Structure formats: C-alpha cells, structure tokens
Amino acid sequence: MKLLLLPFAFLFAFIETVGGQTIISGKVTDRKGDILIGASISIRGSYDGATADTLGQFSFRTRKKDSVVVAASYIGYETELRKVLIAGPTMEINFRLKDAFNELNTVTITAGTFEASDSKRMVMLRPLDIVTTASGGADITAVMQLLPGANRVGEQEGLFVRGGSANETKTVIDGMIVQNPFFSSTPDVPQRGRFTPFMFKGMAFSTGGYSAQYGQALSSVLLLDTQDKVSDESSTNVIAHLAGVGVGYTHKGVVTGQLYYTNLAPFLKLIKTNIDFVKPPQGFGSSLSVYQNLSKNGVLKMYATYSDNDNALGLPNYDNGGKTYLFSLRNRNFFTNNTYKVNFDEGKWTWQSGFSYSNNSDNITIGETPGDRKDERAQVRTVLKRLWGANMENSVLAGVEYHNIQNSNVFGVNEARLQENYSGAFAESEFYLSTKLAVRAGLRGEYTSIIDKANISPRISLAYKTSQYSQVSFATGQFYQTPEKNYLFLNKNLGYELANHFILNYQISKNDRTFRIEAFDKDYKNLVREYQNTFDPNPFRFPTGPTDNGGFGNAYGFDVFFRDKKSVKAGDFWVTYSYLNTKRLFQNYPVEAMPTFSTAHNFSVVYKQFVPQIGSNFGIIYTYTSGRPYFDAANPVFLGDRTKAFTNVSIAASHIRAIKGSFLVFFLTIDNVLGRRNEFGFRYSSDGQSRFPVIPVAYRTLFFGVSMNISSNAEVPKEGKLDL
C-alpha cells in the first residue's frame, strides 16, 4: 500500500500549480526608492504570491477574479494592502513600504518544530515537497522521516522521534487527534498514512517542546491543517496506475468526492517480493469533503472517508525452520473530522469548535485462530483565541477537549476490553517583549478515567532575533502520556508516563537558503516496566509479567539541516544529519539499553530539478542510517549487537502534457535503485537458537501510472517551474 496515493498527489500538485489566468507583476521599494530583496507579495485569502528578486521585482499567476486585496510585506516595514480589481491577462502593481519601528512580528518560535506550510515565514517544507521527494511515496510520514530528529524504521509505520517509539507521536488534524492515521498494521510490513498531503494547507512536524494545546504524546505531534477553499472551478480527476484506478470530482471548490479501487496484483507481478502474498492487497474507498461559508466570517469544514481493504500473507514460522503460516487481515475504517471556525470584532476574536469520530475494525486470522481488533474514538474540542497589541501580534487562547475511547482485542477464546474517558484543558499565550524577543507560555491539565489520574504540565518557548535573518530559540516543558493499551488490559493501576524536554535551536534563512542546528535533551520518567525471568525479543508478544512505572531513560543529541533553493536554477536540495545517544529501562528490558528502534546516525541528501523545456520534474535521494541494536542471546551485553547500516538511493520523475484542454501527468518512481539488501533487525525462534533477518517487502520497487484532470480553466505553464 506504500505507493498507493502517489499518483493522486502528483495530480493535485499539478492542479495546484498551473491554474493561473492573470499575471500580476511589479516592484517593491522603500520610501527612499531602495529595493527590498525578498519582500513577500500575496493575495489575501489565497496562496497566490511571490518573493521580490534582486531587483525588487516580482511576478506571479492567479486565478482570482474581481476585487482582491494584494499585500506586500517585509521585515522591519509596515505591511501595505492594496485593493485592486483583476481584469485582463496582466496587471502591474508597485509598492513603496514604510518603516515600521513598532513592527514586532520579526521573530518566530522555531525550537522543536519544522514547518511545512504556505503561511509561515520560517518555512521548511510545503505539501508539494512531500509529493516530489523520491522514496517518500507521497506519504507525509515517510518524508518527515527524512527531516532531522526522526529516523526510518523500515519494518513498521509511524514517526520515531529522538529516541521515542512510534506510539509517542500523535497525528492531529485541525486540532483533533486521529485514532488510526495509518492503514492497519501487518507484522514487519510498514503501512502508509491514510491521507494525501494536498488535503492540507500546512504541516508542522514537532520534534519536541510542542504547544500546550496538544497532549498525550511523549515525543512529538504531527499537526495537519486542512485546506481552505482554493478555487471556484469544477474539475474531474481520473487516474490509473499499477495499484488500481480512481476518479474524483470537485464542484466549484465546495464539495469534493472521490472513489478508488486498489489491487496490487499487477504491481506484485512486476517486482520480486520477499513476502509470500497469498492474497494481494485489494480494496475500495471513498471520501467526501465540504468547505462552506455559513456566514461572512464563519467557515464549516467537513470531511469523511470510508475504506475496506483485505490481504493475506504467508509469514515465516520461526519455530518450524522458516516455514510459513497464514496471516490474513480485513480492515474497515470510517473517519470523519468536522470543524467550524468564526472570527468577530474585526478578527480580534476567533472561536473554533470541532467534532470527530473514528471506527476501525480488523478481522484477523493467524494460522487457524481467528481474532478481532476494534477501536472507536469520539471527541469534541473548542478553542477561543484573542489577538491583541498594536499590530495584533500577540495572542492568548484557552480551550477544552473531551474524548471517549473504546478498544477491544479478541484472539481465540481470549478477550480484553477497555473504555476511557479522557479530558483536557489548556491555556497559552504568545507575546513579544521587544522586536527581538518572543515568548510562548502555556499550561495544560489532563484527566483520564482509565487510570483515574490527572496531571498538569507547564511549557514555555523563547525566540531571540540575532540578526535580520537569524535567531535562536529555546523550548522546555513536561509531556505526559497514558500507558499503552496492552499494559492497561492487565493493569489499570499504572500512572502517566512522563518526558521532560529541553531544546536549543539556531536558524538562519536568507536568499532561499536555510541553515538550522538544534541540540536537545529528553528525560524519561515513570515508564512502564514489565518484570520477567528472561527477555523475550518478540515485538508482537502480549505482556504477561507484573508491571509498574519503574522505568526511565534519556535521549540527547543534535540535528543539522541545510536547504538551498537558490544556487541551481529551477533546482532544490537539502541535507540533514542527526546524532542520537539514548538508553532506556522499560517494557521487558532487563537493564538499561538503546532501544531497538533507535539509531545513532541518520543522514540524507535530497535533490530535485525541474526542466521547463520538456515540462518534467526529476528527483533523487540518498539516505544513510547507522546500525540498530538487536538481541543476541549469545552476547552477554544486552542489545550489544548492531545491524549493518541502511543505505538507499531512490529516484522519481513526472512529465506533464496538455491534450485538448486536459492535463496528463505521467509519473515514475524507483525505490532502492541499487537493490541494496537492507536489514532492519532479526526475529528469533522461541528457544532463541535460530534467528531470521527482517527485510523489506522488496529490495527494489518500480511504480508508474498516469492521471488526467479535466477543468474548464486548465492551463499548462509555458515558462517557469513547478512550485517545488
């Protein structure tokens, strides 16, 4: 399923890029006539805009019509708003900005957060970056794993952040926690995320020290904000590729519906796999989204999706010479996320409320034994926010949320059930003490009925501007999480697990180049520990020994990030490196050790190139990850062995053509071009005498397809590059 949504993402990326009808150009200077290199120009309420070049000139396309407000801004100057009437194929607007000695929005808190949005000044990645990154498969999480602070764990889905396990990271859409952000888990087969990146206008990947608005995550939150209305046009999308077919229709930017059918049989016939697929993954799905202005200042967003997928594998029986046994899975998932947002008093006040519900059902057969996994989550959330200050640069907010969560596991004659009522309340303020110093301080309180305990966690972040283009940031705070459900099935007397974060960050961003370095220290307390006479390395085991909160751990290190979109014309590349030193005493570990999902060194290089002469994009990525710990009963040092290093070279390409008013997008990806035989760890027989390597589903994969968009205002760009 990993590459399933890639073609949809390429199609949406293309539509997002090429819909312009009017070219708006001009020049930005100050009152003295000096040019302002890098000034930002955009149409209010849209993502159409550009940045002034070395001559102070700008140019961009827009599909907006009639009356719009064009804004020009630059650090240290007042933002100028110009109301214009768009008419004709071209128009010129020139700006002369005033000095703003009282302008305070010159520093942004960045410690612990990588932004991927179109609205933040400190932008690292945007949604289109997700779909144009080779080896990412247009999957949000897969690309986020290439950023500093995260490491790739090839046999399991999820974000593993700075020594944290996958369950320590939560996915949040418009403020609401997503119960099942990935397709249902299969042993040693990583699953992709359920959502395409172009559902979202912004993505923020927190590596720690995140806002008090969110909780129940010891390490990280992945914050996703859904798109606003981006077009008044209607369009039809059709797609075909090795994994299936799909069709989508958008009516005047208000309602979008999609249907798709997947069957990986053609894909699996093309490549050699390391897994015996008794039944190739197949299924169908649908989604419906609505964006509606209910009033002048109020917006309703509704999203619902349903999917039904099944597959069957022959998994190795480690106690029987590697022979296989049947593992079949049928997953049915329904998810809906709905929010209403309104602002009043000229935008000084904002109120947002949301409701979401998810229902996930897995029917499983392991060998000849049937089983079921079911979970439900219903949640409501409301937040009130107030802007204040001379330029509305400061804010204060408060909110509450409530969740009802139900889980059940049935395997053979064994059955376990949980019901949890979880509530949280939070308050937070962001304010500027000077033009160079920004502060964010927050407090969060939580209560959960399942362990009948409450907590209060303070959090604070600071940012200081060291020059026109650089700043330092610091963040610290406490982060609590309820223990994993497998432990709560057996012991409801456990307490919250706790992580204390300390993060120091330096960042400089100038001329489309960004350099960032961040040091961190994360201290774990009250981790769940299971006591057994011997260590069982099986990651899929169900706990059986007595448990308490006697575990602890620590993780420290640093990350480096550099991105350059300037040096090569129509090119873009970034380099990341992360160093991690971590140890834990938790779960059924007998002594403190580096967890099996952690790696000391992670390095990646990403390069993309657009060739306008042929309307094509090309990308290549190289990743390196040092060896991960694994258990060897013959080694007296617990988890003292390491796998061989992981390396991967992947490429991606896409080509765009216009045929009779329609767009055709051809795409191709090849993962692990060199066919490197990577290993992610080992599995053992029950007596510990035999071990078997955990390897990828395939050493090399190739995927290709074509998509078509039919729209009345479709237009292929004749010059320039796709907005990477």
Image (tube, rainbow, N blue to C red):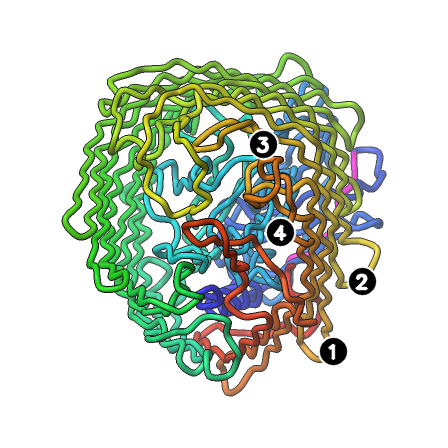
Q: Is residue 314 visible?
A: yes
Main SS of residues in magenta: strand
Is the residue under label 4 in contact with that under label 2 (CB below 8 Å)? Answer: no
Q: Residue at x 22, y 43 (%)?
A: 376
Most foreground residue, 513 or 229: 513
Which numbered disc flags the more N-terminal residue, 2 or 3? 2
Amino acid carrying label 3: it is Ala
Q: Nearer the viewer, mark 1 or mark 4?
A: 1
Name the spot of residue 380 as percent of width and height, x first.
25, 33
> Whole-Å distance between the Cαs marked 1 and 3?
54 Å
Q: Is residue 25 magenta?
A: yes
Which of discs 1 and 3 lies nearer the camera? The answer is 3
> In front: 623, or 384?
623
State the CA–CA distance, disc 3 to disc 4. 50 Å
- In what element is the residue under mark 1? loop
Residue holding disc 3: 593
Left-right relation of 359 to 612: left
Label 2 vs label 3: CA separation? 47 Å
Q: Is residue 521 left or right of residue 397?
A: right
Q: Amino acid at mark 1?
A: Gln
Badge nearest the viewer, 2 or 4? 2
Q: Amino acid at mark 2?
A: Lys
- The residue tagged with tag 2: helix, strand or loop? loop
User: Reading the chain from its start, which is encountered first: label 2 or label 4?
Assistant: 4
User: Where residue 49 is drawn, which disc sits there?
Assistant: 4
Highlighted magenta segment, given as a residue range: 23-30
* Residue 613, disc: 1
Residue occupying the point 39% across, 20% down: 549
For disc 3, the neighbor class at 10 Å (few under 14, some 14 to 19, many from 20) is: some
Relative height, residue 128 to residue 36 (above, below): below
User: Could you tell me the amino acid type at mark 4?
Assistant: Gly
Count of labels in the image = 4
